């Protein structure tokens, strides 16, 4: 399935926003993301064959298929990257690595790098781990990153201009301070 870059960005923004809402609102945001991906957001809303409210897991499974299994990818930009100080946290996960970039902003959270996804911003180099084993490690990785980071989806361009959607950790305190709010 081919999706225009702006449609892919909009769908990913809707998916990321859905994580913060109650079940009904979450389902509606996920449905909108699916419509954007499948019909470029221009489809006839009366002809939906999507699961009803209360079935977020089914909507998420459909998005997982439409986006070619982003749960099997992690883009890293800092200490988890091969050769960096915390790489041992993911080194045992078998998979393949590719170089790429994601639009965003880098800044610090203490001594560690923090990322903020920002469509249209400068290219931040990343390394993308692709592995069917990653879904078994998300809880452990989320715990390792802690409350200072949240895992989101972001469009990533792999060297050679192939676009895909990947998980990436965003720095929460960095985002809030960059937006003018006080860090937690």
Image: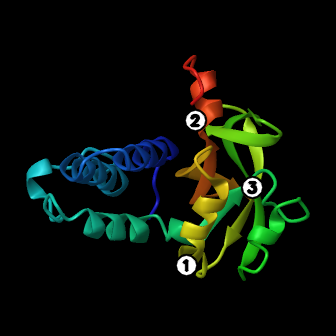
User: Can see residue 40?
Assistant: yes
* C-alpha span from label 3 to label 1: 24 Å
Q: Position of residue 13 (x, y in %)?
A: 44, 43
Could you say whether the residue bearing mark 3 is in a helix, strand or loop? strand
Residue at position x 36%, y 44% in the image: 20
Residue under label 2 = 119
Could you say whether the residue bearing mark 1 is in a helix, strand or loop? helix
Frontmost of labels 3 and 1 is 1
Q: Position of residue 84 (x, y in %)?
A: 88, 59
Q: Position of residue 10 (x, y in %)?
A: 42, 42
User: Against 118, is 39 above or below?
Assistant: below
Q: Earlier in the sequence, mark 2 or mark 3?
A: 3
Is 168 positioned to the left or the right of 91 in the image?
left
User: Against 132, is 169 above or below?
Assistant: above
Residue at position x 42%, y 68% in the image: 64
Could you say whether the residue bearing mark 2 is in a helix, strand or loop? loop
Image marks 2 and 1: residues in contact by CB distance under 8 Å? no
Quarter of the rendering occupied by the C terminus = top right
User: Can see residue 161?
Assistant: no
Residue under label 1 = 136
Q: Residue furthest right?
A: 83
Residue under label 3 = 100
Quarter of the rendering occupied by the N terminus = bottom left
Residue at position x 58%, y 35% in the image: 119
Residue at position x 45%, y 54% in the image: 3
Q: Position of residue 43 (x, y in %)?
A: 21, 49
Is 46 positioned to the left or the right of 57 in the image?
left
**Front-most of residues 88 and 38:** 88
């Amino acid at each position: 399935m081919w999706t225009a870059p702006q449609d892919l960005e909009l769908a990913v923004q809707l998916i990321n926003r859905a994580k913060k809402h109650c079940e009904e609102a979450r389902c509606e945001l996920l449905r909108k993301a699916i419509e954007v991906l499948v019909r470029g957001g221009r489809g006839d809303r009366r002809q939906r064959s999507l699961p009803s409210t209360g079935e977020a897991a089914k909507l998420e499974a459909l998005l997982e298929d439409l986006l070619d299994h982003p749960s099997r990818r992690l883009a890293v930009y800092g200490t988890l990257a091969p050769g960096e100080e915390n790489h041992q946290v993911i080194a045992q996960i078998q998979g393949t690595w590719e170089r790429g970039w994601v639009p965003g902003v880098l800044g610090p959270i203490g001594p560690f790098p923090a990322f903020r996804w920002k469509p249209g911003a400068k290219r931040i180099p990343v390394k993308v781990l692709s592995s069917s084993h990653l879904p078994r490690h998300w809880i452990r990785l989320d715990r390792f990153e802690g409350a200072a980071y949240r895992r989101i989806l972001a469009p990533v361009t792999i060297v050679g201009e192939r676009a895909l959607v990947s998980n990436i950790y965003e720095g929460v305190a960095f985002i809030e301070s960059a937006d003018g709010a006080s860090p937690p």
